[in-house]
Amino acid sequence: MDLLDVGRIVAGLALLVLGGELLVRGASALARRVGISSLVVGLTVVSAATSAPELAVTVGAVLRDEPGLAVGNVVGSNIVNVLLILGLSALVVPLAVKQRLVRFDLPWMVVLSIGLLLVSLDGRIGAVDGVVLLAAVVLHTVLTVVIGRRGAPVPAAAPSGDRGAGGGTGGAEDVRTEEEPPPASVPRSVLLVVLGIALLVAGATLLVEGAVSIATSLGVSSLVVGLTVVAVGTSLPELATSVIAVRRGERDLAVGNVVGSNIFNIGVVLGLPALISPGGIPVSGAAVALDIPVMLAAAVALLPIAFTGFAVARWEGALFVALYAAYTGYVVLAATEHDALEGFTWTMAWFVLPLVALTLAVFTAYEIGLRRGRRDPLRSP
């Protein structure tokens, strides 16, 4: 382990925190000025910005003929986004989920994840597959902006005194909005976004370089490095942005950032390199058999959690973080062929995962029962 690599990791973390702060400030101010919700900004501008490191790493890996790193980076980043980033963000503050996100964006992310699995079954993501993935992201972005504009009858930058008693989403949020100073001008907001993106990319690049250098010196394969070290490193912009957004009260931006980043990662970060690479992007059998299905399972697991209570509670966040730790542990044990792999696999397959599935089923049924109970009195005369 080189001290220079450690220095890169520390400097990268510092730049990520600063860049995330600037990006959240600029994006939230821009949303208030333009008159669209923070959710739409998170699904489009912020998600594309925080996915820039993934795009840079994947394109570079394809050009260097390291397809394992390219695929592992995207798949691992999407797993990190749902299980680790949403989990940690929910531990800070329970995350509210808009109905629009549940009915439109989350299903889109699940369908796109299924599409990635299907196009990878033949062991390669070709040019035609890349066009389809890119088109799906373009269509989602257009629909997101259109729906977002329709759903924003009052610009967020409007004076707070003009809002009626029923105009806000809750008393606490209205008080916070009234106490905030007027949002920055559009040029200043754009400048903050650009500076934030630049710092996030620079920080992620430094951190990934240092982490990859340490990991490869230990003899770890490129797929495993992509699924773990690089995936976490390139997802740190999402983590920094989401946690800072939550602490600043922009919970819509935090959730939209993660969902939008996952959609962008599949459609653009994998779709674009598949177009520029002459033979497409090879996908290993290990990724098709385990890692892409895990990514799909994480996306599907988010649906009932968000749908039942339209929120990700702290205990659900803790569960997501624990599942990510278990997945990472399995990947590392399998890569190193450790003696504990067999026992770990048996425990996860026959005890932990069935217990998690049972817990989710029970709480889903409980939440659905509560919602029906709340609706029934309104229907009675």
Image: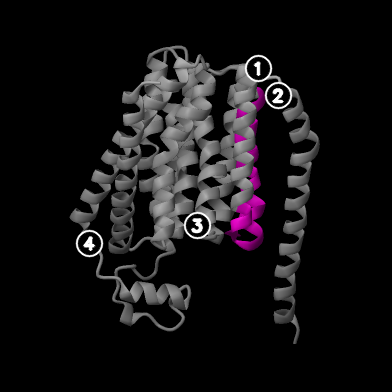
Three-letter residue code for mark 3? Val
Three-letter residue code for mark 2? Leu
Determine contact: label 2, label 4, CB under 8 Å.
Answer: no
Q: Residue at x 36, y 29 (%)?
A: 6
Instruction: Farthest residue to the bottom: give it.
Output: 381
Crowd class of label 4 (few under 14; some 14 to 19; many from 20; radius 10 Å): some
Relative to the observer, which residue lies in front, 13 or 41?
Answer: 13
For residue 341, the mark is 2
373 lies above or below 322: below
Q: Which secondary structure lies at badge 3?
A: helix
Q: Is residue 309 magenta?
A: yes
- Residue 165: percent from the left, percent from the top? 44, 84
Q: Earlier in the sequence, mark 3 or mark 1?
A: 3
Determine contact: label 4, label 3, CB under 8 Å.
Answer: no
| Quarter of image, res 83 | top right
For residue 92, the mark is 3
Q: Residue at x 31, y 49 (%)?
A: 23
Q: Earlier in the sequence, mark 2 or mark 4?
A: 4
Q: Alpha-carbon distance for marks 4 and 1?
A: 54 Å
Q: How is the image coloured?
A: one colour
**Residue identified by numbered label 4:** 184
**Residue identified by numbered label 1:** 337
Q: Earlier in the sequence, mark 3 or mark 2?
A: 3
Relative to the observer, which residue lies in front, 47 or 137?
Answer: 47
Please identify the dominant SS of the magenta region: helix
Q: Which residues are magenta?
A: 289-316
For the question of whether residue 242 can be seen, the reply is: yes
- Residue 210: percent from the left, percent from the top? 37, 26
- Residue 84: percent from the left, percent from the top? 54, 43
Determine contact: label 1, label 2, CB under 8 Å.
Answer: yes
Q: Alpha-carbon distance for marks 4 and 3?
A: 27 Å
